[in-house]
Amino acid sequence: MAPSAQPAIHPATRLADIPSGERGLELARRTAAGCTACDLYARATQTVFGEGRASAPLMLVGEQPGDREDLAGQPFVGPAGAMLDRALEEAAIDRERVFVTNVVKHFKWKPVAGSKRRLHEKPNAGEIRACRPWLDLELEIVRPELVVALGATAAGAILGPSFRITEGRGTILDVPDLRPRVLATFHPSAILRARTPDDRERMLAALVADLELAAETIRTA
Ligand code: URA
């Protein structure tokens, strides 16, 4: 844990004070802004809490904010967000009707020698665990019909470490101890990193098909 003048506030100690409903989301956001439950707050600009309506039937969960999201304080507003917006549009899903968040609410990065760039680093199991109460609170307040886990980190956090996107994506899953059902799919960043244009097209088509299934599932829920 990084040295800090303040004692660490574990989010779980505040959850009982937060009522459900629209006001609950705002209060949750303000409470999360002071989270020091793991080291990541020390090097991030701010907590990036989930965004969207408290009544959204669909919740999209990514890994963690990137460089642009860290500066803006909003999830999925950088290049991965543009790819997500494109897929949502192709699947005829209005982003206004979706709650978008991440399993980890602070940007984890390392410096690049000789550059001002901040290089994304994957969150570890302890960081994901420390941040989990915020995702649980978002789920409790929003009560979505369906959660879409974007990529391996979100899928691993929600469906367990043995889940593999390549084998298990595109299927609506019931998860023990979780009310909404879950659909795992490719992360928009994985599409941006695809090795060939063909791979990119194939992965984007799969993401769009999975989002179409998500839309159909909440329509018939
Ligand atoms: N990647 C994510 O997983 N989440 C974001 O908010 C942005 C990029």
Image (cartoon, rainbow, N blue to C red):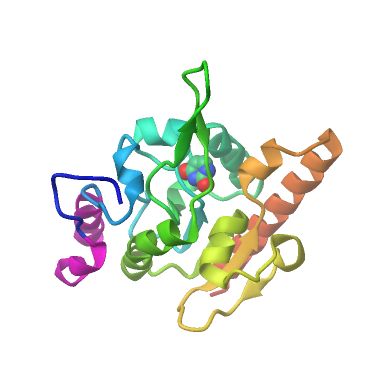
- 161 and 213: which is toward the camera: 161
Q: Horizontal and vertical percent for residue 108?
A: 44, 42
Q: Is residue 77 visible?
A: no
For residue 65, above or below residue 56:
above
Residue 14, placed above or below residue 104:
below
110, 135: nearer the viewer: 110
Q: Position of residue 144 (x, y in %)?
A: 43, 67
Query: Which contiguous range is marked in magenta?
Result: 10-32
How many marks do you count on the picture?
Answer: 0
Q: Residue at x 62, y 75 (%)?
A: 173
Q: Specify the principal SS of the magenta part.
A: helix
Image quadrant assignment for residue 131: bottom left
Q: Residue at x 20, y 50 (%)?
A: 30
Residue 159 makes an appearance in the image: yes
Seen from the viewer's position, the closer of residues 162 and 63 is: 162
Name the residue rendered at 82%, 42% in the picture.
199
Q: Residue furthest top?
A: 114
Indicate whether 198 appears above or below 11.
Answer: above
Q: Is residue 31 magenta?
A: yes
Q: Is residue 88 left or right of residue 117?
A: right
x, y percentage for residue 221? Answer: 53, 75
| Residue at 35% from the left image edge and 54% from the top image edge | 53
The percent position of residue 155, horizontal first and vertical second, equals: 58, 63
Q: Is residue 18 magenta?
A: yes
